[in-house]
Image: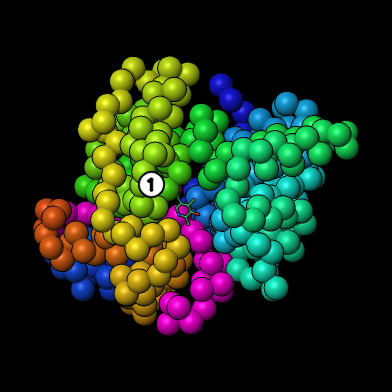
């Protein structure tokens, strides 16, 4: 059993979206508020970091290194988690240093992270370079992969499914579909394992955020590798196959981080109907997909649908007028 530390406020709230449900009648729509995990404005990475930082501390590390986009929610939550646990935080982000840091990047700086700008792309050499310098300076650094998606991080989302099961049982509620944004695959792999472990009936509908690039490992493969790699340890006697890891594509056509009419519609709709803020990169895309599925009756009318809000609020302050 891997250990975990406490970095957020759990369980996150599960509640009904009454105004949205009225609009999409006869669907009944619920939301799981991982945008409210409490870690420097929250998000799904909090759950993964509870395991990842425990592993870093157990390994005797004094420094954490991770990587991502400049507006990475994962990087921002890692910076906050490091501040809480007294670890040094180094973030490797793609691109040139902006004149003014905003959104997630601003918060990461405020939270005390040292930012390394990888101009062009983040190469293995660049990461090794940062690790080497830390080592030469007597630091013991723990490297967390993109999105915290490894066999340790995904355990946070195995627990999350147990948490959801407990809430549903208490409310005597059954959910038919769970929509969420899938990008580095850890959330999805953890949910897949957790669904099997806790016997949840809901069908997972992961929405692809980043258009698959030629030559890269497809996300489905990554998810399966993570899920099958961790299943033994969790005593889950199931071999996950391709059909278990299907991901909804097509809503990612504009590319990662590119805001279209779809994302704008989703942000405005949920904000104005329910007073809940999505983010332009992940949750707006997944939420739009969910409403599109309901409108086109691609899921059974009358079913109960859960939107898993994975956070990302600070990115709104970077995108600014693009989302208006
Ligand atoms: C990272 C992130 C996701 C995707 O989670 P993965 O585990 O990387 O697939 C979804 N939504 C938000 C807001 C995120 O920051």
In the image, 155 versus 89, the foreground residue is: 89
Residue at position x 43%, y 17% in the image:
232
Residue at position x 48%, y 82% in the image:
321
Secondary element type, mark 1: loop
Residue at position x 79%, y 45% in the image:
88
Q: How is the image coloured?
A: rainbow
Vertical placement of 221 versus 291: above or below? Answer: above
Q: Is mark 1 within 8 Å of ligand 1?
A: no
Q: Is residue 299 left or right of residue 132?
A: left
State the image coordinates of residue 244 (x, y, percent, origin top left). 26, 33
Vertical placement of 273 versus 89: above or below? Answer: below
Tell me, yes or no, whether the highlighted magenta stretch contains residue 275: no
Residue at position x 50%, y 50% in the image:
44
State the image coordinates of residue 13 (x, y, percent, origin top left). 45, 56
Residue range of the region highlighted in magenta in the rendering? 302-324
- Dot 1, how many residues are within 10 Å of its Cα: few (below 14), some (14-19), or many (20+)? few
Quadrant housing the C terminus: bottom left
Quadrant housing the N terminus: top right
Tell me, yes or no, whether the highlighted magenta stretch contains residue 307: yes
Q: Quadrant of residue 103?
A: bottom right
Q: Is residue 154 visible?
A: yes
State the image coordinates of residue 188 (x, y, percent, origin top left). 38, 41
> Which residue is identified by label 1?
213
Q: Is residue 64 visible?
A: no
Q: How many marks?
A: 1
State the image coordinates of residue 132 (x, y, percent, origin top left). 78, 35
Q: Is residue 288 left or right of residue 85?
A: left
In the image, 20 versus 216, the foreground residue is: 216
Q: Quadrant of residue 128?
A: top right
| Residue at the limit of the structure toward the right, as seen here | 137
């Amino acid at each position: 059993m891997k250990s975990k530390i406490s970095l957020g406020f759990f369980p996150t709230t599960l509640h009904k979206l009454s105004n949205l449900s009225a609009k999409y009648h006869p669907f009944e729509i619920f939301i799981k508020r991982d945008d409210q995990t409490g870690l420097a404005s929250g998000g799904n990475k909090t759950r993964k970091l509870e395991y990842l930082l425990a592993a870093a501390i157990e390994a005797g590390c004094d420094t954490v290194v991770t990587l991502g986009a400049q507006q990475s929610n994962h990087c921002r939550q890692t910076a906050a988690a490091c501040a809480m646990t007294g670890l040094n935080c180094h973030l490797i982000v793609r691109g040139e240093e902006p004149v003014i840091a905003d959104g997630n990047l601003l918060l990461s700086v405020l939270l005390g992270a040292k930012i390394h700008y990888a101009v062009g792309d983040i190469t293995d050499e660049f990461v090794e370079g940062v690790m080497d310098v830390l080592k030469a300076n007597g630091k013991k650094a723990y490297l967390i992969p993109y999105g915290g998606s490894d066999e340790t991080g995904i355990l946070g989302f195995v627990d999350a499914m147990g948490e959801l099961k407990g809430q549903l049982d208490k409310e005597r509620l059954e959910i038919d579909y769970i929509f969420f944004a899938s990008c580095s695959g850890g959330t999805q792999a953890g949910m897949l394992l957790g669904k099997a472990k806790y016997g949840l009936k809901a069908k997972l509908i992961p929405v692809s955020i980043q258009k698959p690039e030629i030559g890269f490992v497809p996300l489905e493969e990554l998810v399966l590798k993570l899920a099958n790699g961790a299943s033994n340890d969790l005593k889950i006697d199931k071999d996950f196959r391709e059909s278990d890891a299907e991901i909804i594509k097509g809503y990612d056509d504009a590319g990662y981080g590119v805001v279209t009419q779809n994302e704008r519609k989703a942000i405005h709709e949920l904000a104005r109907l329910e007073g809940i803020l999505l983010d332009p990169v992940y949750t707006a895309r997944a939420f739009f997909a969910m409403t599109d599925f309901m409108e086109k009756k691609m899921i059974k009318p009358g079913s109960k649908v859960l939107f898993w809000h994975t956070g990302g609020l600070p990115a709104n302050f970077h995108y600014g007028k693009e989302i208006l």
